Image (spheres, rainbow, N blue to C red):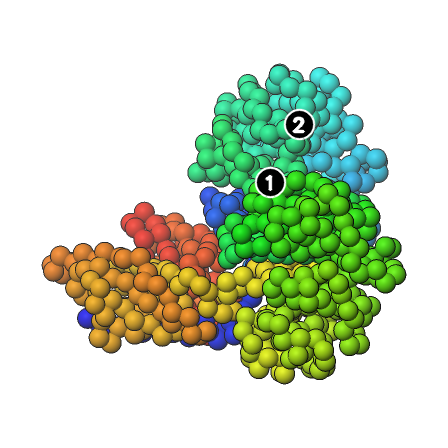
Amino acid sequence: MKILATLLFSSVIALSTMAQWELVTPIKTRSEFPGIQMVSDQIGYAIDRPLGAILSTDDGGITWARLANNITSQPRALFMWDALRGIVVAGGGTVIRTANGFQTTTTSLNPTFGNISCIYFVNDTLGWIGTESGKIYRSTDAGANWALMASGQPTTNYITAIQFVDTAVGYASCYAGEMLKSVDGGLTWQGVGPFDQLVLIQDIHFYDVDLGVGVGNGGEVIRTTDGGVTWDSIPTNTTSSMVDLAVQGGTLVACGNFGRVIRSTDAGLTWNVIQVGNTDHQSVTLTPGGKALLGTNGRIHTSTDMGANWELLVEGTWHTRINKVSFMDADTGVAIGWQTSGGFESGLLRTTDGGRHWSKAGGGGLGVHVTSDGIGCLGGGSGSFARTNDGFVTRTPVTGPSVAIRCTWSFDANTHIVAGGAVAGGIYRTTNAGTSWTRVLDVGNITINDLWFVDALQGYAVGEFGDNYRTVDGGVTWTAMSAISGSHTVFFFDALHGWTRNFRTEDGGATWTLMGGTPQSTMSIFFTSLDTGYAVSATGQTVRSTDGGLTWETILPEILNASGGDAAYVDGHIVIGCNNGDIFRSERIACGSTPWVPEVDVDDETLCTSIAGTIQWYRNGEPIEGGNEACLTAETGGSYQVIVTDALGCTSALSEAVQIVITGVEQPRTALRTSIHPNPTRSVIRIDRSTLSPAQLELLDPQGRLVLSTNLAGSSMIDLADLPAGLYLARIQDHLGVEVIRVLKE
């Protein structure tokens, strides 16, 4: 048995010393996607106009990561050259460029441009943008700089689409049924046509200088075979406006209003109508492999057969202001949000997989609580109240007390407590499932933000202005605690030990001691033992104490543009609910109740696990002597598994078994056709190939994610300066086969 040690996993440790956050609700009901583009069957990008976001997917659209947020100028169009290089254009003349998949960007503001409406590049450097004021600009340096062209259009004729078939000949559609043509690379433009009908064409595609298709308002499709001199109006059997067009070969798919999709398989001669949902579609993309995505209002649909059949892939969650989060166990929890103005929605979100995925569960409010057996309640403005017996699979609305309910607590199906304010603020209690309510804390107009009970009798309430109370009879009566500052959160581990944002107690709240080290904006605090606890700020910064709150250290960073309302500790992870309906789930910060299962990557007889820590490999259920490295090369056939104890001290379960079959006959190895040097490298690598045949390079990071894709011919220079240090796999494929070479970036 030979043990293969690598530098890969030590580099992973060096690059990630602090746990990170994952946004698990990137798409909202309010989302609109005016641009979506798949650069392969798995990797794609989208822009969310109302929320000012750029999103990416690496699994065909199943999950999305938000790469940019709160772009105030609202993104309007997207163009990607490949998996890493692309441009987003937006209102106010904003141009956002990236060379690393929008991990970092360069933004230029060109206020004189006005709102940019469309973008097209014919190669790596030469491209054009059109604006809502009838202007066309040209770039010869991949979008870094732009020059105004002579479009000849008034400011009322906004440009809807641009496409060039080569560096000289291009077309542009614009308002009032105009089609423009350039034969000098976009320097000057002339009108072509006319159309049979005066319609607004929203998008165009030209196969060559003669054959082109346009789609637009009222379901209109126009087609030319003579470079725009004449146009045919093509029937489509729909009057719904089409706003975007995607093409692969003879297949064209256009999408538009009221869920309508039209499709042609003969280069636009004939069309059939497909109904995909009933909301407006904003954008469509097609890959050569037949993968398609529809960017829809609040949804993303997918097709695997060039748009012939569609299914809902992602449905957006509520765009809301999350105020409270509550979990009944390690899997099932709810988050409640409020506000119905400014594009926000009052909504309840529910998860059944520990916060990894969330779905809409009905109307929301301000406060929610659910017990371990699924009994719970929620409340909101004007005394709205509902109770549940099944973890909010269903709910029963009941009239609550006339107060803005900010927090709730349930004991059983009949006994519930709600609190809030400020008008008629205080605490209310019911013992008949909400049929009637008793105001058990009536001390004027106060505001109670949070409730916590350690058992059926002893509980606590805190307010943002120092209105802090406790009960020893299940909430029937309440007494004021000693004066401490206001807080959004309170937590007690037992009847004696408790914490608020800045204070701790060891005598059940009779006296309190000021803590140091918790963020000033702490909005949630909880302890998993008398020693170990977590305080989460509104910005996402999370600190941990291992001495009962005496000292604290940061373990999770701030989240860009986050405004958190509440958080929960869920089986080794932190889940935080924020403004805009954003819910973030942290990487594991402590050991969970169920051992995690490590993944094993296989390359011939080499097996690797990507989790750093103490490693033990097994063959046929027996530990392998010396099998303690991240990668292992098998010289004997058998069933291989691994157990990893990570940096947190959490021991995994056995990985899934990998069967290795070795015939014992040495196979001749084909000589490498490719060499890469310098290797290791700090930035640029040179790729030399023994053949001039075309090839494709894919560079994979330590987690197997594609970080670079490009075509090769002969020798090539590739700049890796923007990539983090670590070990990468370069996969080179040509007509002779596939080669994989490890590349170390220092």
Residue behind mark 2: 258
Is 331 placed left or right of 320 in the picture? left
Q: Is residue 342 visible?
A: no
Q: Nearer the viewer, mark 1 or mark 2?
A: 1
**Quadrant for the N terminus in the image:** bottom left
Position above or below: 99 against 220: below
Q: Residue 329 in the image: x percent, y percent?
A: 52, 56
Residue at 35%, 52% in the rendered image: 733
In the picture provided, is 421 more to the left or to the right than 203?
right
Q: Are marks 1 and 2 in contact (CB under 8 Å)?
A: no
The foreground one among 181 and 256 is: 256
* Residue 178 point in image, percent of width and height: 75, 28
Where residue 120 sits in the image (x, y, percent)?
64, 43
Q: Which badge, 1 or 2, is on the more N-terminal residue?
A: 2
Q: CA distance from mark 1 to mark 2?
A: 30 Å
Q: Pointer 1: what residue?
A: 394
